[in-house]
Amino acid sequence: MHPERWEHGSDYGSIAGQTLGASADADHPWAEAGQTYGCGRDALCALVEHGVQTRSWRRLWLPSYFCEDVVAALDSLPIEILRFADGPWSPEPSIVREQLVTGDACLLVNYFGTRDRLGVETEGWPPGIDIVQDHTHDPWSPGAHCSRASYAVASLRKTLPLPDGGVLWSPLGLPLPPAPQLTEAHAARAAERREGMEMKTAYLAGGDVSKDAFRARLLNSEQSFGGGQPSAMSKESRALLDRLPIADFRRLRRENHRYLAERLTGSTTFEVFHPQSSTAQGCPLALVILCPSQAAREDLRRRCIEARIYPAILWASPAAHDVEADVAFSSRMLALHCDMRYEREDLDRVVGALLR
Ligand SMILES: Cc1ncc(COP(=O)(O)O)c(C=O)c1O
């Protein structure tokens, strides 16, 4: 990174131009049987349509603490959406099993990659229920590998520097929907995103690219995901997926997470979130910190942005959301990126800005 262009967080740049091995020996939980899609929402929407048509799904339970863009993408599908109280602070999914009836599907989330035992939480469910797991935040966790869920989905573009991509598989070996076609709309958004990512990489290296120009492409393409017909993944991203050193990426992310957590523990302005459910084999998506109030979070976020540090809020709850625990977490949290882009000196700079 060019010293004057240093920044931390936000979208990935492109690594497509870097020397990568011919093929990385990625051990995907979906092995050969996974079906890739344009994004996580495309995978989930295709699954829900398939569930309605072939498994008589009538109701889909989603956790109350969740990405509302995903909930919105399910809006037009012929299924009733219900919510159960659940969030990252709960060691295991807290759905009331007695409420479930035949024809229900239930989505369980490995929040921030810190609930990696999710895969074994599938015993003792009433008959006629399908469990769907969302492994977006750590698709290669032990829980994803040993899952006994009917279906599992993941967005691949949150943990990997890919312009697009999501995956659907069935740990139980159930039939999947027919393979999707690459839609024109998706090919265009993936191309725009790829260009934005390449421009960001050039910008960070000191090239003649404006920040406004790459951000416009990244923001515009991001806003267009998750609508319309589910698409296949772009062939460029599909080819890149096969070459990414995923095990190394996970190791680096886990080490960075540990380093940041150690350095930031003991702050008087925020606390480091340590869920009881995280294990040494899981790989957290980001380091989550919690401020004492929303005002304190906004203040810290403003200071981060001034220092060119761009943490994420996962997820902002809509104004109408009234589950107290969700609002309390969402309004006080920041997720600090700790992925393979960062070396110790980057993280030290983040720590310096946060503890100032
Ligand atoms: C847990 C989870 N599931 C699914 C999705 C949807 O993924 P995509 O944005 O690729 O559609 C997201 C995106 O933020 C997510 O965080």
Image: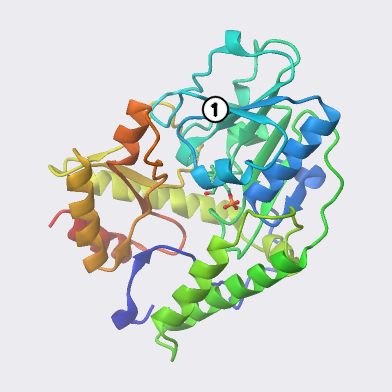
Q: Nearer the viewer, residue 225 or 333?
A: 225
Which residue is the site of mark 1?
117
Pick the quarter of the image with the C terminus: bottom left
**Image quadrant assignment for residue 9:** bottom left
Q: Is residue 155 visible?
A: yes
Rendered image quadrant of residue 267: top left
**Residue 284, position in %: x, y?**
45, 43
Seen from the viewer's position, the closer of residues 341 and 122 is 122
Image: 331 above or below 203: above
> Which residue is pictured at 16% across the width and 53% down the height?
355
Residue at mark 1: C-beta within 8 A of ligand 1: no
Residue at 68% across, 60% down: 241
Callout 1 crowding tier (Cα within 10 Å): few <14, some 14–19, many ≥20: many
Which secondary structure lies at badge 1? loop
Q: Nearer the viewer, residue 204 or 22?
A: 204
Q: Residue at x 55, y 55 (%)?
A: 248
Indicate the amino acid at tag 1: Arg
Above-or-below relation of 234 to 317 = below
Placement of the N terminus among the 4 image quadrants: bottom left
Residue 202 left/right relative to 299:
right
Residue 274: x and y in percent read 33, 33
* 54 horizontally vs 268: left or right: right
Total of numbered circles in the picture?
1
**Residue at position x 65%, y 10% in the image:** 124
Residue 211 on image: x %, y %: 40, 80
Q: Can residue 28 be seen?
A: no
